[in-house]
Image: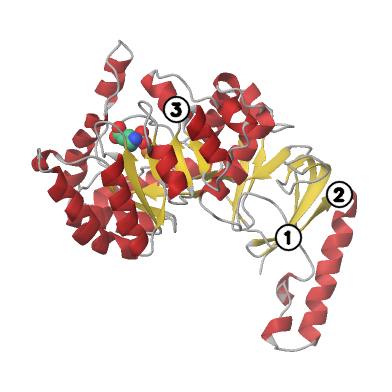
Amino acid sequence: MTATLITNIGELTTNAAADGDPLGTLHDAAVLIVGDRIAWVGPASAAHAAAALHRESASRGRERGNDPASRPPVEPSREEGFEVVDAGGRAVIPGFVDSHTHLVFGGERADEFEARMTGTPYAAGGIRRTVAATRAASDDELRARLRGFVAELHAQGTTTFEIKTGYGLTVADEERLARLAAEVTPEVTFLGAHVVPAEYGERREEYVDLVCDAMLHACAPHSRWIDVFCERGAFTPKESRRILAAGVAHGLAPRVHGNQLGPGEGARLAVELGAASVDHCTYLTDADVAALAGSSTVATLLPGVEFSTRQPYPDARRLIDAGVTVALASDCNPGSSFTSSMPLMIALAVREMGMTPAEAVWAATAGGAQALRRDDVGALAPGMRADLVMLDAPTRVHLAYRPGVPLVHTVWTGGAAA
Ligand code: NIG
Ligand code: FE
């Protein structure tokens, strides 16, 4: 098992709340990674003592023999040395958790973006163009594209990410999108209910039947979540409720696209069903906010969409002040938000949505983890996955303070540096 000691960290964001600081900030800190987990977090002055302690417990474990319960946390061959990384006073944060992406698709829609920038409004119908391009692409083409996006995410500090289907919209195409997504993440969401595909015309009910039956059957084995685009131009609240209930009956957990293009019932439906998250939340009534505040449903805000569609940004301040848990995600997709940059989401949330830099960093890490109901990522504490980002900056504030500048220095995913 490999072991790495990262020391001389100028500012460490642990997200292990302490002394009224939800981000559990430590200065002059160190982190010890053993295998794929965090083994210890503390002051840099105690780092070598902590590492020595682990070495000792490793060799004690070896003397105790082969009982798996007492197996040493460090391989004998590594006993003499931990790899030591000197952070040089840089900031270290948990890896970003991007809880909302649509990364498996064919084609692009730069022409739509260009038209929007001269006044054409965004509409859900553009999804059908990507559906046509996705159906025309081979598995290998989609896979190569997907792997490129995954590399792009990692390079920007994202270590956990969700991927939705939704650009296939036939049983066979949705199945292959779910299968391809499952090759790169355990967080796969079945989104057969993205829009009613063109070939169904007015036969909406038939398509909803298909989603709830054959398509769900084909996709559920590759998926953890079910989602529905509950919005004018996509699916009604009644259809959405039926689709989500079918998914839940199949063992999938619900999440909802809601309140993106106008007011609607998406947020309240998500709360009613105990969904992990309702995503977009651009148009919320006071009743929606109150319902979210009294629930375990996370409001996931996707500012890349408002940036790319020239819509008003969601009011994060209002949500946080009401006690709602807020996450930030990229919504990376070729229509409404063709960016995978979590640092950009943080900068937009701070500049345009009333979030403090600390709130935005929390929402892009711990908030995303909560939106995916994951308790092993999004924070840096003993036992958590060793997913960390070292910034080429002395503080996390620089993520918003230096927008557009690539500040990711090193990313550790499951303890491995890249
Ligand atoms: O999350 N809202 C629905 N789906 C995507 C848009 C997809 C597209 O335009 O291709 C979204 O914004
Ligand atoms: Fe989306």
- Tell which of 114 and 409 is nearer to you: 114
Where on the picture, by quarter, is residue 327?
Answer: top right
Could you tell me if residue 195 is visible in this image? Answer: yes
Label 3 or label 1, whichever lies nearer to me, is 3
Report x, y in % for residue 160: 52, 50
Q: What label sits on residue 332 in the rendered view?
A: none
Left or right position of 28 against 334: right
Residue 240 horizontal/vertical position (percent): 30, 45
Q: In the picture shown, does residue 331 fall above or below 185?
A: above
Whichever of callouts 2 and 1 sits on the residue coming sooner in the sequence is 2
Q: Label 3 belongs to which residue?
A: 282
Question: Looking at numbered disc 2 in the image, what kind of residue is underneath it?
Answer: Pro
Residue at coordinates 74% horizontally, 37% vertically from top-left? 90
Image: 374 above or below 127: below
In which quarter of the view is residue 112 placed?
Answer: top left
Say which residue label 1 marks: 382
Please tell me which residue is depicted at 90% across the width and 50% down the height of the picture. Answer: 45
Q: Earlier in the sequence, mark 2 or mark 3?
A: 2
Viewer-proximal residue among 27 and 174: 174
User: Of residues 62 and 352, which is closer to you in this image?
Assistant: 352
Query: Residue 43 got which mark?
Result: 2
Residue at position x 81%, y 68% in the image: 54
What's the colour scheme? secondary structure
**Secondary structure category for the residue under label 3:** loop
Labels 2 and 1 touching (C-beta < 8 A): no
- Splitting the image into four quadrants, where does ligand 2 fall? top left
